[in-house]
Amino acid sequence: MLRLFLVAAIILLAGPAAAIDGVACNSAAVTVMTANGPRVFQVKVADDPEEQARGLMFQPRLATDAGMLFIFDPPRPASFWMRNTMIPLDMIFIDDSGRVESIAERRDTYSEKISKSRGPVRAVLEINAGLSRKLGIEAGTQAVHHAFTEAPEEFRCPG
């Protein structure tokens, strides 16, 4: 029961856009259950091939609480590079249940070195380099977003 309450509270923290049974849904926010408590990232969602190919290329900066969320349907192995990416990033690979599968930390800018997930993932969250370590985000950390939340069906957002 406590877990259900926490998941509902976390989704509410993400900010209103639509609601299901009083629970806010916002496709532009991801909440990560960090070692220091929930951390909400306002994200741009890349869910089509064109947006995913462009990613954060040519962006000169990224706010501390911002990121980009790449969503894959169905889940698949993911690989990323940093070609034309001006911002050093952490790439957080998230499985179908919303758990962090792995992290590629402090990726160099403009690099063609490939970072890969260990297996199929539902999403990849890109945030500023070093932030995942600073916040205590590691393999197994829970992330909440309607694309992959573990919340019971009645708390899942459409989409």
Image: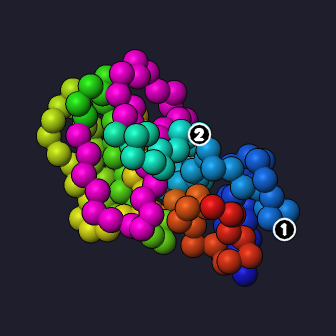
First-in-chain label (1 vs 2): 1
- At x 42%, y 68%, the residue is 74
Quadrant in the rendering for residue 55: top left
Between 75 and 150, which is closer to the camera in this rendering?
Answer: 75
- The residues bearing labels 1 and 2 have C-alpha atoms spaced at a distance of 23 Å
Residue 76 colored magenta? yes
Is residue 29 at least partly visible in the picture?
Answer: yes
Residue 31 is situated, as x and y percent measured from the top left of the image, at 58, 53
Q: Which residue is mark 2?
A: 42
What range of the chain is rendered magenta?
Answer: 54-81
Q: Is residue 156 left or right of residue 61?
A: right
Between 54 and 26, which is closer to the camera in this rendering?
Answer: 54
- At x 40%, y 52%, the residue is 124
Quadrant in the rendering for residue 112: top left
Residue 119 is situated, as x and y percent measured from the top left of the image, at 27, 68
Q: Is residue 12 left or right of residue 52?
A: right
- At x 23%, y 30%, the residue is 83
- Graded by Cα atoms within 10 Å as few (under 14), some (14 to 19) or many (20 or more), the crowding at tag 2 reads many
Three-letter residue code for mark 1: Asp
Question: Is residue 18 placed above or below 99 in the rendered structure?
Answer: above
- Graded by Cα atoms within 10 Å as few (under 14), some (14 to 19) or many (20 or more), the crowding at tag 1 reads few
Residue 13 is situated, as x and y percent measured from the top left of the image, at 71, 51
Q: Of the numbered discs in the image, which one, if any, rests on residue 114?
A: none
Q: Is residue 112 left or right of residue 57?
A: left
Residue 38 is situated, as x and y percent measured from the top left of the image, at 60, 53
Residue 108 colored magenta? no
The C terminus lies in quadrant? bottom right
Q: Of the numbered discs in the image, which one, if any, rests on residue 21?
A: 1
Three-letter residue code for mark 2: Gln
Quadrant in the rendering for residue 25: bottom right
Question: Is residue 73 placed above or below 68 in the rendered structure?
Answer: below
